[in-house]
Amino acid sequence: MTVSSHALEFYINGQWCAPAGSERLDVINPATETPCATIAMGNAQDVDKAVAAARAAFPAWSASSKEERIALLEKVIALYQSRSEEMAQAISLEMGSPIARARDSQAWSGYGHMQETLDALRAFSFDTVRDDMLLTHEAAGVAGLITPWNWPMNQIACKVAPALAAGCTMVLKPSEVAPLSALLFAEIMDEAGVPAGVFNMINGNGPEVGEALARHPDVDVMSITGSTRAGAAVARASADTIKRVLQELGGKSANIILPDADFQAAVSDGVRRCMGNSGQTCDAPTRMLVPQARMAEAMNVAQAVLSELRVGNPADETTEYGPVVSALQFERIQALIAKGIEEGATLVGGGTGKPAGLEVGYYVKPTVFGQVSPDMTISREEIFGPVLSIIGYADEEDAIRLANDTVYGLAAYVQSCDLAHARAVARRLRAGNVTLNQGAWTVKAPFGGYKQSGNGRECSVFGLLDFLELKAVIGYGEA
């Protein structure tokens, strides 16, 4: 693909402009371990400039009509669709997503979330009169948006679309690890005619640009998707100005396979779901809980599934799983796999090192551990790679206890042939999303977590509400 001609520029106040500083960063193709682009890196001066543009644009955009916002989103969506292949190629290049998945999951998710936000906006009532009160939803203000590398368009769409729909203006800082898709998205926003200052984008790292954005007194709301550590840093930086902070953070999601489940199907699906996106998904079911008496059976099924997984070059249309995103991520995953072996978990398949024939690129062997105890590192820490831990439970109460025994609470999964049984267990799990029996993911569901998985909810009308303030006008008069 052709890398954006604006890679060394930022999009501020309706135009592409040079950064304040001269720092540059190579973007590494994880399949080749070589640079595929170079981007400019911003600093606090760039943040000041972008925030000033967003602040100046806020009065007019927040006063825009619902119809104007609908029309703008329609233009953005149409242009996004027309450039969907470019978007898929950019995502595949920057973060190693297999091209087939980059098309039907990665790039599609950006479209799916924007379309769902548009539908939610069309149905949303900003004003309601109750008794003698007007209850009105108003734009929260200038939004700082920080997005990750693992689902770049999914997360940009989950933040930009509802912020636009709410009447907010914004500054987006995408991940510097995978910025090519964000540059393309900014081109789409420009071509759609977004009013100057409503959408601004600068590249940079978290400690400098992210922190400056969170600390800025003219930013009213911060939305971050990232690690729990990064979310805590944004919250601390935002505290002095009492910003609203929306966080979608880490996870260590349990997948409870109940004794009455279709065991082989449930284990097979659980392995594949864990490995999806090369394990780089925050709500992946990375802890599989099975009856202790069926541990050997679960390990055998998992081993058979591992033998079927196709890891390889992201450009190959038949590849299911590509490399992980970076050398840093690769080394961290390797260390955690080694830790699992050291602490005595049973290695079902995979392990340290790269798959045979894939010596170049940040490829990780899809790995499954059995007989994992709840106190092991691989059972506690978010690995963010294709590594599954199978944990045995004594009975249903024990399974629920183990599922909830984590600092995270992003997602959970329950498998049972008795839907009423699965529903009852789901109610007892402390997680923002619970998926029953291989249920299909949907852009309509609110997404966010309990505990250290963050706060706030993205997607559909739930994401829209997070960018709105609620005002009560008392004595307004009855309807």
Image (cartoon, rainbow, N blue to C red):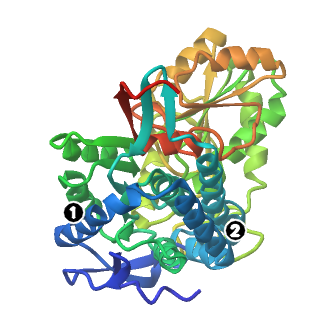
Camera sees residue 362? yes
**What amino acid is found at the position of numbered circle 2 in the picture?**
Arg
Checking the image for residue 208, the label placed there is 1
| Residue at 65% in and 20% down | 426
Tell me the crowding category of disc 2: few under 14, some 14 to 19, or many 20 or more residues within 10 angstroms, Cα based: many
Question: Mark 2 sits on what residue?
Answer: 103
| Residue at 46% in and 82% down | 34
Where is 15 relative to 294, above or below? below
Q: Quadrant of the N terminus?
A: bottom right
Where is 420 relative to 297, above or below? above
Where is 250 relative to 217, above or below? above
The image position of residue 298, as x and y in percent, is: 74, 32
Q: In terms of depth relative to the viewer, which is nearer, 14 or 442?
A: 14
In the displayed structure, does residue 116 sit left or right of residue 15?
right
Give the quadrant of residue 197. bottom left
| Residue at 59% in and 12% down | 398
Identify the mark nearer the N-term, 1 or 2.
Answer: 2
In the displayed structure, does residue 220 sit left or right of residue 130?
left
Q: Gap in Å between the C-alphas at discs 1 and 2?
A: 33 Å
**What amino acid is found at the position of numbered circle 1 in the picture?**
Glu
Q: In terms of depth relative to the viewer, which is nearer, 309 or 269?
A: 269
Q: Secondary structure at mark 2?
A: helix
